[in-house]
Amino acid sequence: MSVDPFWSSVRDNILLDPAQTYLNTGSYGIIPKAVFEELTELRRRMQQNPTDFLWRSINEPLWTARSRLAEYLRVDPRQLLLTVNVSIGINLAAWSLALASPGEIVLTDHEYGAMHYAWERAAVRQRLNLRVISLPYQLNDPGDVVEALLRELRPETRLLFLSHVYYTTGMVLPLKEICREARRRGVLTMIDGAHAPGMLPLHLDEIDADFYSANLHKWFLAPVGTGFLHVRPGLEDRLQPMHVSWGWHYDRNVSHERDIFGGTPWLRSHEFEGSRDPCPWLVLPSVIQFQEHIGIERARSRQLALGDLVRQRLDGLAGLKLTTPHATTLRGGLTAFRFPIGMTGPDVQAFRQRLWERHRIEINAVENPHGPFLRVSTHVYNTEAEIDRLANVLPATLRAVD
Ligand SMILES: Cc1ncc(COP(=O)(O)O)c(C=O)c1O
């Protein structure tokens, strides 16, 4: 099967090991070769003289990286906290955000387990109720999804926590309408955008959530160690830094003015957590350049086209049942299937291990009270041949562990 030369060249320019079938960008993306080389060179320079690198050299590059990302996301760089990953971004808000009690925090039964725990602790600490609602992922009309979620808001709802793209089924939420209506009803919104950058056009000014955190190390193809938290202007004082460090005391009159550390005093109060490696953040301009070379609409079309092939080849195969919505507005690069009835957690792990050991195929199996789900990620560097390879070995692999 011939591959379009454009996509072949994209594949040639990333670090992927060609001997493997990597269908797990949903966990970690593969970075461009040029980004890897830049990162390695930065780390070499840092280790040659860490004092000079960390004290003097990174102010401007860090501000440039933040500004490029802010421009890409269409927000003010002064509201954009760089984090190591989305877990940190969400925890930063969940652990410190004061919400009026009595009241409730609402989330769905498809949120990432670790993030659910973060809100569980927040609710216990603040004597709030944590209400888990059922995500209507079988719906195919975005309007119905919005309505089903908004129906769950009550006068006592203080905060709504949702994923932009569900890690279980790959469903994409129409966030704009949800965030707008929640705000109108006095409910704060926090979005877990772990999978959105690089999968969807991401204009945070349009979504207009109160807090939006994401990973850049998955679909955006940045190195592990990159994420962000965007805080809507006016909400800065609702948060407390998770780590108290040198940024703790600062002049409130200049909270949002450029400082000599690549941010602002308010940003530094959250970001500075002691000595750390800033290099993954510094390569963000090159990552964005790679993303813009492809173009997000083109990337999305490619991901959807490969996703269509996954659906065609896997739905019904050996008892697998598609759980990702049909409407293209409600899906992206993740396609998920329910495993055949009767497969237990250990069977699923054995299946994944066997796929890897025998066939060097990397996919994920996601645990959830509704699951487990088989999850296939299709990114721009994947090929039709890889999907065929997976489909060809799936029935025998499932039989072997059942
Ligand atoms: C929806 C969702 N949220 C949060 C996370 C946590 O990501 P990280 O471990 O990079 O912080 C993941 C990871 O897969 C995820 O899928």
Image: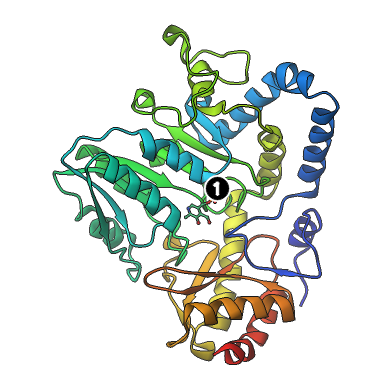
Q: Give the answer, above or below, for where 9 lies relative to 33.
A: below
44 on left or right of 260: right
The residue carrying mark 1 is 197
Residue 94 on image: x %, y %: 37, 40
Q: Nearer the viewer, residue 41 or 151?
A: 41
Residue 5 on image: x %, y %: 79, 62
Q: Residues within 10 Å of mark 1 (few under 14, many from 20)?
A: many
63 on left or right of 174: right
Residue 208: tell me if it is visible.
no
Picture quarter with the N terminus:
bottom right
171 on left or right of 52: left
Q: Nearer the viewer, residue 10 or 278?
A: 278
Residue 106 on image: x %, y %: 27, 51
Residue at the location (78% across, 24% down)?
50
Residue 131 on image: x %, y %: 24, 54
Q: Give the answer, above or below, for where 51 lies relative to 347.
A: above
Q: Give the answer, above or below, for where 109 lies relative to 313.
A: above
Q: Quadrant of residue 138?
A: bottom left
